[in-house]
Image: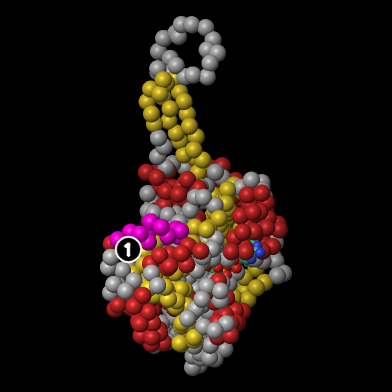
Amino acid sequence: MHQVSLLINGEMQASSSTQFIDVTNPANNQVIAQVPCATEQEIEQAIMSAQRAFDTWKDVPVTERARVMMRYQALLKEHQRSIAETLAQETGKTIDDAMGDVWRGIEVVEQAMNVPSMMMGETVENVARNIDTYSHIQPLGVCVGITPFNFPAMIPLWMFPLAIACGNTFILKPSEQDPMTPMRLAELFIEAGAPAGVLNVIHGGKEQVEPLLTHPLIKAVSFVGSVPVGQHIYRTATANMKRAQCFAGAKNHTVIMPDANKEHVLNNLVGASVGAAGQRCMAISVAVFVGESQQWIPELAERIAQVKPGVWDDKKAGFGPLISPAAKQRVLGFIQSGKEQGARCLVDGSECQVAGYEQGNWVGPTVFADVTDQMDIYQQEIFGPVLCTMAAASLEDALTLVNNNPYGNGTSIFTNSGAAARKYQREVEVGQVGINVPIPVPLPFFSFTGWKNSFYGDLHAYGKQAIRFYTETKTITARWLENDIPGGPNMTISLS
Ligand code: NAD
């Protein structure tokens, strides 16, 4: 049985732990590897190795740090397919979707290659006579990343390349459900020339995360995962005086105006709702049809019903299984509650099976109509291939619904009216908005800007905000004397 390694001080090493968690293929629940729960001593070694590496890495010129990222980007591109195959087998994603997961991560590494210009400070000459003020951007020290199962390539790559390009060192604690993909990313990072200790990877769950949130040498914590865990991590890290950015759950609405292009809407909503089995934090899980567009709901349901789940290398599969039997049971529970609470189940995926893979965590595409904001299927994040459709009389009503929802990760509007789109983009209380684009995940020169219960913190992932998150600003005020300055002591706070 393959035992997943730890990465400590540049060495891939077997853990001395006696506790292991099974990594399974979600298509048949066969165990494909075992991941160790790192021991206290191993976690301490990882932190100390990152701290030692910081002493030298922070002084490596920014251009050399950028060149490590250039080599890393080339290696990731070269190995994209093999990484995606590992990823597909441990997550169940289709190979095309797995390739996309890796690609969206590579784009962040491309952003990290630009680190010299992103770390430029500011200057104002002659702020007072013969005095200049300028700022420098400096790294923090040891940073930590705790990542979820649903994007095991993209989300670790949201974090460590930018943190390390800024001159920090890093400890990654990936999801215990699919740790082989992040280990492959780590191996390639070493191959790209990252010095020992700059990136460390430890494995496990809650017990392994806790010391990372309290250890005095850890300066910043990045987390992506569910709301309760995100709240706990944000509270614990900040109570221990660390910076924290915690990206959490979501309930993303799309609003369909009657003047939208029907074909465009239907084609886009199929993939945006049930793609990746709905296990995307930016999946569309609620479609709000305004006015006459409600007539399109039956046709949308028909199209979604055509999507067939399947195994990762089945070219006809629209999406794969859920990550675990527990995730499947949770989603089935929501489908049941939707029926009991009075929603109309237009497409029911609860009995879905895939021939030859009867033990897999399958849930088929599911569509509900007549959903109300009081139902559990509306209020909770389902994280499965389940779309709730709702009706609204006007754009105002749709906006009220979306703004009353406690989540604020992403939303979209389909319309041909510039006025409607502008009103929506301006008034909606959600951090990422698509206009005729269903899942508006920004490219990495912007930032990933979820709001409300989808994000705790202030500086977001990637883009300029990530550079700010992973650095301190030092502001220097300097006077160089050409001649002796006449006069006695200056007793005021002015700079003249
Ligand atoms: P999760 O919260 O269960 O786990 C995330 C990470 O936290 C894992 O590494 C896990 O080992 C660790 N963890 C779990 N329980 C912990 C605890 N009590 N204390 C400390 N650490 C703990 O999330 P998941 O099921 O892996 O991922 C799915 C969730 O992630 C969904 O809610 C989804 O919306 C969210 N997500 C959000 C974004 C975003 O950008 N907002 C992106 C992707 C996923």
Q: Identify residue for label 1.
A: 420
Which type of secondary structure does the marked residue at label 1 adopt? helix
Residue at 31% x, 68% y is 415
Q: Residue 266 location in percent, x, y?
A: 34, 78
Quadrant (top left/top right/bottom left/bottom right) for the N terminus: bottom right
Quadrant (top left/top right/bottom left/bottom right) for the C terminus: top left
Callout 1: CB less than 8 Å from ligand 1: no
Work out whether residue 29 can be spotted: no
The part of the chain drawn in magenta is: 419-432
Q: Residue 278 location in percent, x, y?
A: 48, 75
Ligand 1: give its quadrant. Answer: bottom right
Residue at 45% x, 36% y is 136
Foreground: 454 or 219? 454
Residue at 68% x, 55% y is 211
Place residue 319 in its image quadrant: bottom left
Q: Residue 224 location in percent, x, y?
A: 54, 61
Foreground: 112 or 302? 302
